[in-house]
Amino acid sequence: MPAQPGPADAALKLDQFLPYRLNVCANSVSTALSAIYSARHRIGVPEWRILVTLGEFGLMTAKAIGIHSQMHKTKVSRAVAMLERRKLVARRVNCDDLREAFLSLTPAGRDIYNDLAPGALEFARQLMETMEPAERAALDRALSKLTERSAKIAADIAKGGNPG
C-alpha cells in the first residue's frame, strides 16, 4: 500500500493560500465587529450590513443591497424580513416595477444606525492603528486590486473563458 502524502507534500497549503487567508481574516474581523452590535441590538451580520448600507445610501432595492454588500439574495431577503418585522426597515413599492420595492430605514432603524456607526468606526480605527500610514495605504490599494481582479476572473469564467 503506497504511503499517504503528508502535510509537507500537499500541493495546496491553506495557511499560505491567499483566498483562504483573506476569508479567515474577514471572518475574524466580522466576528469581532459583531460583538459590538449583536447583543445590544439583537442583529446578525446580514442585518447589520443592510442597516449600514441603508444608513449610508438611504433608499435602495434589496437587489442593489445584495450587489453592494456581496450577499446572496436569499440572505438579503431573510434579513430584510427580520428588519421589517422589527420595524427597522420600511418597504415602498416601486411603481415603475411592481416586482421590486425600495427599502429605507425607519426612525427606529436610523436610531440603531446612529448608535452603531461610532462603534464601528472606532473598531476600524483600532484595527488600522496596528499599521503604519504607508501600510494602510498599501492595504487599501491591495484590497482594491484584489477585488477588481477577482471580479474580472469571475466574469471571464462566467463567459466560459479561462481564469486570468
Image: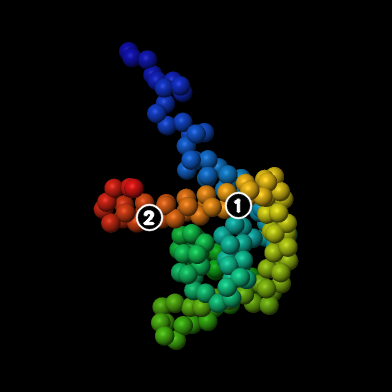
- Reading the image, the residue beneath label 1 is 137
Q: Which mark is residue 16?
A: none
- At horizontal 41% and vertical 78% (from top left) the residue drawn is 99
Q: Secondary structure at mark 1?
A: helix
Q: Position of residue 50 (x, y in %)?
A: 57, 66
Q: Quadrant of residue 85?
A: bottom right
N-term-proximal mark, 2 vs 1: 1
Q: Are marks 2 and 1 in contact (CB under 8 Å)?
A: no
Q: Position of residue 91 (x, y in %)?
A: 54, 78
- At horizontal 49% and vertical 82% (from top left) the residue drawn is 93
Q: CA separation, marks 2 and 1?
A: 23 Å
Q: Secondary structure at mark 2?
A: helix
- Extreme top residue here? 1
Crowding near the residue tagged with mark 1, few <14, some 14–19, many ≥20 C-alpha atoms within 10 Å: few
- At horizontal 41% and vertical 85% (from top left) the residue drawn is 96
- Reading the image, the residue beneath label 2 is 152
Q: From the viewer's perspective, is 32 left or right of 164?
A: right
Callout 1, which amino acid? Ala
Viewport quadrant of the N terminus: top left
Q: Position of residue 33 (x, y in %)?
A: 66, 53
Q: Is residue 44 visible?
A: yes
- Extreme front residue here? 134
Q: Nearer the viewer, residue 16 or 130?
A: 130
- At horizontal 61% and vertical 62% (from top left) the residue drawn is 48
Callout 2, which amino acid? Lys
Crowding near the residue tagged with mark 2, few <14, some 14–19, many ≥20 C-alpha atoms within 10 Å: some
Q: Position of residue 58 (x, y in %)?
A: 59, 76
Q: From the viewer's perspective, is 29 left or right of 3?
A: right
